Amino acid sequence: METFSLYFVLFMIYSFMGWLMEVIVTLVKEHKFVNRGFLVGPYCPIYGYGCLLIILLLRKYESNLEVLFLMSIVICSILEYMTSLVMEKLFNARWWDYSDKKFNINGRVCLETMIPFGLLGTIIMYIVNPFYVNLLTKLPVIVLEILAVILLLVYVVDNIISFNVIKSVKDEIKIAKKDQTEEITKKIKQILARKSILHKRLIKAFPHIKSSDEILAELKKIIEVKKIKPKKSK
């Protein structure tokens, strides 16, 4: 129980730090506050999972900076790719798309995000995690366990609420598909914007959300353009 409590509290800390980082980046780029992530609360679980995977799987590479850096990229990139894939399968929507970035893999991950993963992984292992572990292990066990239980309850409730909100995206996409227009994404945003505050927050958090069908249509257009593109004369 003590070990679980320690790692879960670490998970929530890193999830919050990831959310904070996303908010700051958005604030700098767009000059406005946006509550990033799928969940209502101030945390992005993908960062929590990523940090825990690095901590648990890469301990043996702690003495080798280069390997730690590369393995952090591999782990986080796989996590981001699989998260994008699973969310698209569950809700029939692409929540982020790097297709316009160079060196991307199916628009789910790209070199631009991979390098920061490596840097963050090394910082977590050498600086951040030792600090938080040292801090949390100084707490009485009962305090740590109570903190973990409270955070777990909040997290579970948040997931239930957020899942129901995100599920409505899939329902609205089904409705929008009946029109078979080229503006499916725009229609989804318009429909959700008329709903609750939580729905509006989701649109703000993921402004580039696209339906799976729209992405397939874009890929078909690219393929068709390449087919009809005239060959250069020798």
Image (spheres, rainbow, N blue to C red):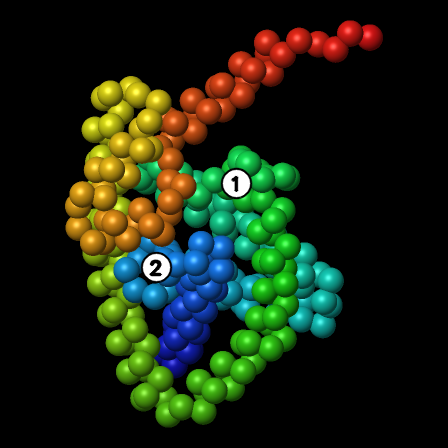
Q: Residue 19 at x, y = what percent?
A: 42, 63
Instruction: Look at discs 2 and 1 and give the one toward the viewer.
Output: 2
155 relative to 145, above or below: above
Q: Residue 148 at x, y = what percent?
A: 32, 77
- Mark 2 secondary-structure assignment: loop
Query: How far is mark 2 from mark 1, CA to CA?
Result: 21 Å
Q: Is residue 63 visible?
A: yes
Write down the quadrant of residue 198 in the picture: bottom left
91 relative to 5, above or below: above
Q: Residue 53 at x, y = what percent?
A: 52, 62
Residue flagged by tag 2: what amino acid is it?
Answer: Asn
Q: Which residue is mark 1?
A: 98
Q: Residue at x 49, y 60 (%)?
A: 28
Instruction: Name the quadrant of the N terminus.
Output: bottom left
- Mark 1 secondary-structure assignment: loop
Q: Is residue 88 visible?
A: no
Q: Which residue is mark 2?
A: 35
Graded by Cα atoms within 10 Å as few (under 14), some (14 to 19) or many (20 or more), the crowding at tag 1 reads some
| Left or right: where 30 falls relative to 186 | right
Graded by Cα atoms within 10 Å as few (under 14), some (14 to 19) or many (20 or more), the crowding at tag 2 reads many
Q: Among all residues in the image, which is located at the extreme right?
A: 234
179 relative to 37, above or below: above
